[in-house]
Amino acid sequence: MRNSFINNLIKKRKKNKNIILITGDLGFSVFENYISRFPTSFINAGVAEQNMVGLSSGLSISGNKVYIYSINNFLVFRALEQIRNDICFHNLDIKIVTVGSGFSYGMAGYSHYGVEDISIMRSLPNMRIYCPSDSKQLSFLFNEINNYSKPIYLRLGKGGEKVITTSAVCKKYFKLNYFEIIEKKEINFICFGSIAIEAYIASINLKKKYDINVGVITVPIIDNEININIKKLINSSNVIITLEDNISITGFGNYFFELYSKYLSKKIFYKLGINKRFEKIGDNDYMKRLNNIDNKSLEKLVKKICKHTFLKS
Amino acid sequence: MNNIKKTIIFARNIRINALKMVASSNSPHIGSCLSIADILAVLFSSILKHNPKIKNYPKRDKFILSKGHAAAIYYAALAESGYFNLKLLKKFCTNGSNLFGHVTKNNIPGAEFSTGSLGHGISVACGMALSFKLKKLNNKVYCIISDGECNEGTVWEAALFASHHQLNNLTVIVDYNKIQSLGRVSKVIKLNPLSKKWKSFNWSVNEIDGHSHSALFKSLSKKSNKKPKIIIANTIKGKGVSFMENKLLWHYKSPNDKELQIAIKNLF
């Protein structure tokens, strides 16, 4: 997704000289093309994230459209007060782009895990979160992201995410406000971000092995002022399972439940996310398994639900 | 300096208004306000290119009060400059008012950026100065920080950044009144030798009497070739009111009616 991000940004920068990209000394083998084309629209702020957010605010309030880039925690936590006071309170046109969502940095350990950022960012005033599931979604959403002139938190994986979104799915987004990766059924996964690949694999396996149909939906935005048009989907479902690679409390699942609690009251609702973040170390797949948010655990869960509810939609 | 009488009157007026504002709202930080009165007076009367009557005046220099707790005297300086009616100052720190206890941009004409948590303003000032450079504009950026604020790591992150990018359109003024929240700077976290520290960060350094209007004018007017400029303004916390000078107490206390009358008399 990093490459998709920079390629899209290059296209935008060609048309808008006021775009500035600032990095906190990260982006090796990602930014070279952008830098060679637009050297004066690129700043390496050094390993100084708090100053980077502050100076991006000064640039933005002076009429520039600013993208700032770093690893998930280095911005969200190190520079949180600057994000809150300088960017959000002033409602500035700044895109906070982070890589390394969830356990993308696997063996690097807890210091590099981006597993609480959604919880934090969704509580900030004026902040809109974008979390595409793959590079196709990112490219599709990029125009909207770039044109929005208020704070954005753009949450990306580390790279190499499998593309599960088709052009046909993107077309339907305009009508639905969500990506229907696998058509809605009685049981549906509602996913946030690149973790959707696990739901996607689980859904395919459930169909193949047990003829169980499960829909896979990805919602790419959290914004307290946007109403996702998802009531119809909930009403036609019996089971809703939210899935995220953020902690299971205060993240996307909670956001979803807060928005739609009255529609969910007669449904079976599961809110899946991360519970174990630093007890053990492992690669991305291992850490997902540890937290039961890998495709095999999702498969088991759905089978269990079907067994207890006699559902086999 | 031609306008010395004007700046002295400006400084006295904003001191009086700040005293009245904190007294009527029972607000803290009057000591921190009084120590920068002379700096604000010279800046707003003689240095800053600004036009309170034109909202987006293109030649406007930017000013950020990074020590946002001295909001009262900053609002007083904006009103004294003509950005809004002096009567509005009576609303300071009252329910429903836009004049918050820390600098808040909320619809306040002339206010550039909200501050309050220390160590933010200098980074924002760097961004503004860089933006002017990128757009090849000659506007300047001024920022006042406090001495206690120099404890913040971000001040030194910004110091590195500004000198690396040769932001010679940026002037930072340290209000070096030697007292921070819980005591004397020398006892809390030593800053000295402060000038040498900034010099080693490759800034152009001037150390002056921060209450001398002529010294302030001279130092603020001085051009810097490639380096960002720092003025270490040696000031006195509570300056101008004898019973407040150099007293930590007046970081917290606001004057009662009797103290307010004595304080105002002190200023004449």
Image: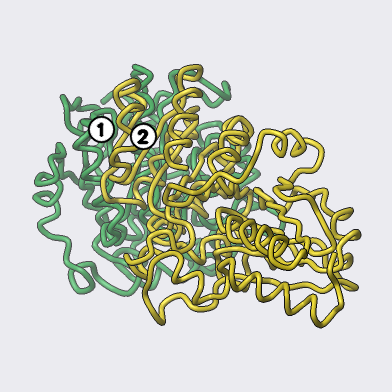
- Image quadrant where residue B152 sits: bottom left
State which chain is coloured green: B
> Label 2 neighbourhood size at 10 Å, few (<14), some (14-19), many (20+)?
many
* Coordinates of residue A40 in the picture (x, y in percent): 32, 23
| Contact flag, marks 1 and 2 (Cβ < 8 Å) | yes
- Is residue B154 among what the camera can see? yes
* Coordinates of residue A159 in the picture (x, y in percent): 43, 47
Chain A shown in which color?
Answer: yellow
Amino acid residing under circle 1 = Leu
Residue at the spot 49% in from the left edge and 56% down from the top edge: B19
The residue beneath circle 2 is: B43
Q: Chain of mark 1?
A: B
* Coordinates of residue B257 in the picture (x, y in percent): 56, 67
Foreground residue, B200 or A269?
A269
Which part of the image, by quadrant, shows the N terminus of chain B?
A: top left
Amino acid residing under circle 2 = Leu
The residue beneath circle 1 is: B220
Q: Identify the element where label 1 is drawn.
A: helix
Residue at the spot 9% in from the left edge and 46% down from the top edge: B200
* Side (left or right) of A78 relative to A64: left
* Side (left or right) of A202 relative to A282: right
